[in-house]
Amino acid sequence: MEQTHGRDRPGAGEAWLADYRRRVEGIRARAERARSRLEGLTATASSPDGAVTATVGPGGTLTGLAFGPAAEGLSRARLAALVLAAAGEARAEVTAEVAAVTASLAAAAPAAPGARS
């Protein structure tokens, strides 16, 4: 026998639709908050000696690079390795933050009204 979840009662369709609209609005609001959080997300990492500091944006793109006094005496190869390491560390941090934001958004999403669990 098919379950109607009360939709055969007078006014049940309107109540279901109102509930659905509330849920959709809640999802939209949470998505907007997540988008705002992701837009300004950055991560910064530095080499242990402070020679290199790298900053990346939410997509992992390098958005800033600074060299400290310790960079002065380093070979180009060592400096390049420190840039890659600092950028990689910052990228891993921002990726984890992006994952946390999107996971919290997915976890907060309610089931559709009348959906079976």
Image: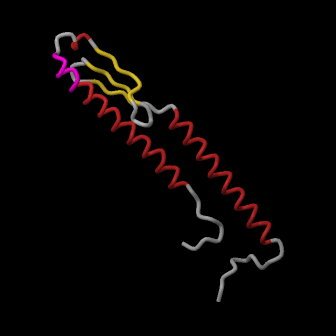
Where residue 31 sits: x, y (%)?
58, 46
Does residue 93 sit above or below 1 in this rendering?
A: above
**Residue 46 occupies which quadrant of the picture?**
top left
Does residue 104 sit above or below 19 in this rendering?
A: above
94 sits left or right of 74 in the view:
right
88 sits left or right of 49 in the view:
right
Does residue 16 sit above or below 87 in this rendering?
A: below
Does residue 101 sit above or below 14 in this rendering?
A: above
Where residue 30 sits: x, y (%)?
59, 47
10 sits left or right of 49 in the view:
right
The residues colored magenta run 75-81
Q: Residue at x 39, y 35 (%)?
A: 60
Q: Residue at x 82, y 71 (%)?
A: 11
Where residue 104 sits: x, y (%)?
49, 49
- For residue 84: magenta? no
Give the quarter of the figure containing the N terminus.
bottom right
**Residue 108 occupies which quadrant of the picture?**
bottom right
Give the quarter of the figure containing the C terminus.
bottom right
Rendered image coloring scheme: secondary structure
94 sits left or right of 67 in the view:
right
Instruction: Report the number of numbered marks.
Output: 0
Residue lying at the far front of the rendered structure: 76
